[in-house]
Structure formats: structure tokens, C-alpha cells
Amino acid sequence: MKKTALVTGATSGIGEAAAMELGNRGYDLIITGRRNERLELLKSKLEVSGTKVLPLCFDVRNEAEVKDAVENLSPDWKNIDVLINNAGLASGLSALQEGDTDDWNRMIDTNIKGLLYLTRYVAPGMIAQKSGQIINIGSIAGKEVYPNGNVYCATKHAVDALTKAMRIEMLPYHIRVTQICPGAVETEFSIVRFHGDKARADKVYEGFENLVAKDIADCIWFCVSRPPHVNINDMVVMPSAQASATLFNRE
């Protein structure tokens, strides 16, 4: 029987790559995001290989939209085996005393509340079937704090703490919980952080070979494909040229 994965933030980057990887590995997919045209494009790509796809366009920051989307799934889609909490972003890069509170709210609402809302409404189904896996996409910023990263780092530290809490609370129900923490991955991340300034975003990745979304999708598949008695609790994945959140070998 085919398994079903729900991937948030599937319209680009790690989410899109994860959906492609799992689809190519035989999973049916629920893909979510705010850009419907990109969801439909991804659906068409996945369906070429025979993958069954359900696109759901909603904002993870909106609890009512999340609740409505999950609770109104048809019987064919209700049994979710894997939840990939990928939707997340950085917005702005400034000292705390100079921070834009709109940026703060955007990060807190997406990175923390979005993850909480999806988990809150998907986990009961996993508990009922006494199986499943939740994969939270964290960050090296959830392990360290770097200058001007204050609120973003705080949100990813929250993901780290919530992952540990989920692992404890899901334990009686045979639900595996994993966190994957990437270092520098070239996606739309820096473009979003710098509010569309592509020239500034490109400088982040100059002088070294960064990770790409497919690298993290490979890690996701490794975690998902372990036998049931094996759980990868926490995985930190960095480019070879990156030693910490801020230390790179740029040549």
C-alpha cells in the first residue's frame, strides 16, 4: 500500500526537492504553499511519473486555513504517514534594537506557529493509526546564534525545542520525530531575507560550494527510509566549506 507524505512550503527550495524525491520513491503527496501556480506546476511534474498529488494552497500562518485543509481531507488522503514541516523563512538581518517588528512577526508566525498548527491537526491522525513520522526542518541557526540573526535564530531554537518535545510526546504512539538542520543552502532563502535584493543574496554564497535543495531532500529520504526501529533524532548538514553559522572557507 502506497504511503502519503504532506510537505509544507513545497513551492520552492527544500520543500519542492523533498516532494520530488518522495514522489520518485513512490509516495503519494499532499503539497502545500501560498503560490497556487507553483503548486500546479509541481503537481504536473510529479504526475509524469505516476505520482498521485493533492495541491493545497493556504498560508501556514493562518490556523483556520490549516485546520480547514487538514480536517476536510477526503478519505483517500486522510492517512498521512509523513509530515514534513518545511515552510519557514528569514526576514531581515539587523540588530535587535533596530529590528522591524513586521519581520519578527512574519518569522515567528511562519517558523513556529505554522509548524505548530500543521502538527496539531495532522498528529491526531498519526496517533489514531499508531504510526507516522514528523520531520521538522530546522537550521544551524537553531544550534548557534549569530550577529543580527536574533529573532530568526530564536525561531529555529524553538523548532529544536519543539522537536524534542514532540519526540517525547509521540513516543507512546510509535511516531518517529526527526529534525534536519541545514547550513548554507542556496534556495530563495537569502532573497526573502533581503526582501528581494538578489545581488545582496548572491553574495552570501560567493567563494564556496554551498548545499542545494536536493542535498537536503536526500537527507530527508535517508531519515524516512530507515527501518521502523531506527529514528534519526537530529541531523546537522553543512557544506564542506562551512564550519559554523558564520565561518566559511571562501576561496
Image (tube, rainbow, N blue to C red):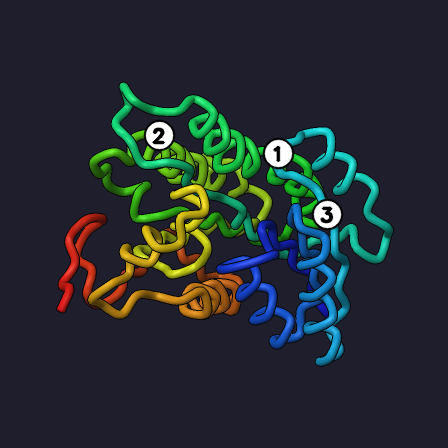
Foreground residue, 47 or 250? 250
Foreground residue, 203 or 40? 203
Q: Which numbered disc, 1 or 3, marks the residue that appears first in the sequence?
A: 3
- Asked whether residue 1 is in view, the answer is no
Q: Amino acid at mark 1?
A: Tyr
Residue drawn at x 45%, y 47% as measured from the top left:
196
- Asked whether residue 162 is in view, the answer is yes
Tell me the element at label 1: helix
Q: Residues within 10 Å of mark 1 (few under 14, many from 20)?
A: some
CA gap between label 1 and label 2 equals 20 Å
- Measuring from the top left, give residue 181's x and y in whole percent: 36, 52
For discs 1 and 2, the disc positioned in front in the rendered view? 2
Q: Seen in the image, is 2 located left or right of residue 202?
A: right
Q: Hey, which quadrant is residue 66 in on the image?
A: top right
For discs 1 and 3, the disc positioned in front in the rendered view? 3
Q: Amino acid at mark 3?
A: Cys
- Measuring from the top left, give residue 243's x and y in whole percent: 17, 57
* Image height of 228 relative to 117, above or below: below
Residue linked to disc 3 = 57
Q: Residues within 10 Å of mark 3 (few under 14, many from 20)?
A: many
Tell me the element at label 3: strand
Q: Seen in the image, is 208 located left or right of residue 16?
A: left
Q: Which numbered disc, 1 or 2, marks the residue that appears first in the sequence?
A: 1
Residue drawn at x 60%, y 33% as measured from the top left:
61
Foreground residue, 210 or 190? 190
Residue linked to disc 2 = 151
* Image height of 194 relative to 40, above or below: above
Foreground residue, 75 or 200? 200
Residue 117, numbered label: 1
Q: Hey, which quadrant is residue 124 in on the image?
A: top right
